[in-house]
Image: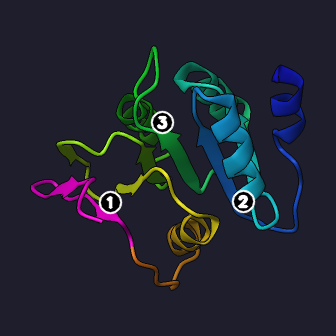
Amino acid sequence: MEQKLASLNGRKTDSQKTVLVVDDNAENLILVTKFLEADYHVLVANGGADALRRAQKYAGDIHLLLTDFEMPGMSGIDLATRLTVDRPHIQVLLMSGFTQGMLVLNEGWHFLPKPFVQSQLQALVKGLVSPGQKSKFVGTGTQEQRASAGNE
């Protein structure tokens, strides 16, 4: 499985947009990468600490952080908070299969409940990384707004 993940990391495409995909589940990483790799340069990280290392080593712009919400060691929220310190213009899309309760998202962060279909993910990513593109976001956070993961 590790070899398969390593082979996915950093495949070059014609796209100038880079997406950092983070999940602690290898199957999810492989699936999401396959959904996006035709249109974006995809960096793959197995958890928060790995994502921070990859982002630090990557000299180019990272346009989108697509991360699982709940991971061992570092949550997606913690990862996004830390990553946006050094990369304040990065878009954040959190995904989770846990749809109970409320999520508090920082302003400009977005949420995608699992499971999702390829077209839904592609539309969200396109809307986030392409200026002027419109897409329907499952959840958009503001300082005082809470996005309920279970409303969709």
The magenta segment is: 137-152
The Cα–Cα distance between marks 3 and 1, rounded to whole angstroms, is 14 Å
Give neighbour class at mark 3: few <14, some 14-19, many 20+ (Cα, 10 Å). Answer: some
Residue at left offset 59%, top offset 36%: 22
Q: Which amino acid does label 1 sit on?
A: Gly
The label on residue 83 is 3
Q: Which of marks 2 and 1 is in front?
A: 2
Instruction: Name the element at disc 2.
Output: helix
x, y percent for residue 107: 26, 56
Secondary structure beneath disc 3?
Answer: helix
Q: Which kind of residue does numbered mark 3 sit on? A: Leu
* Residue 77 sits above or below residue 49 on the image: below
Q: Quadrant of residue 46?
A: top right
For label 1, the residue is 108
Note whether 123 is above or below 87 in the view shown: below
Q: Which residue is drawn at 21% across and 55% down?
A: 148
Outermost residue to the top: 73
N-terminal-most mark, 2 or 1: 2
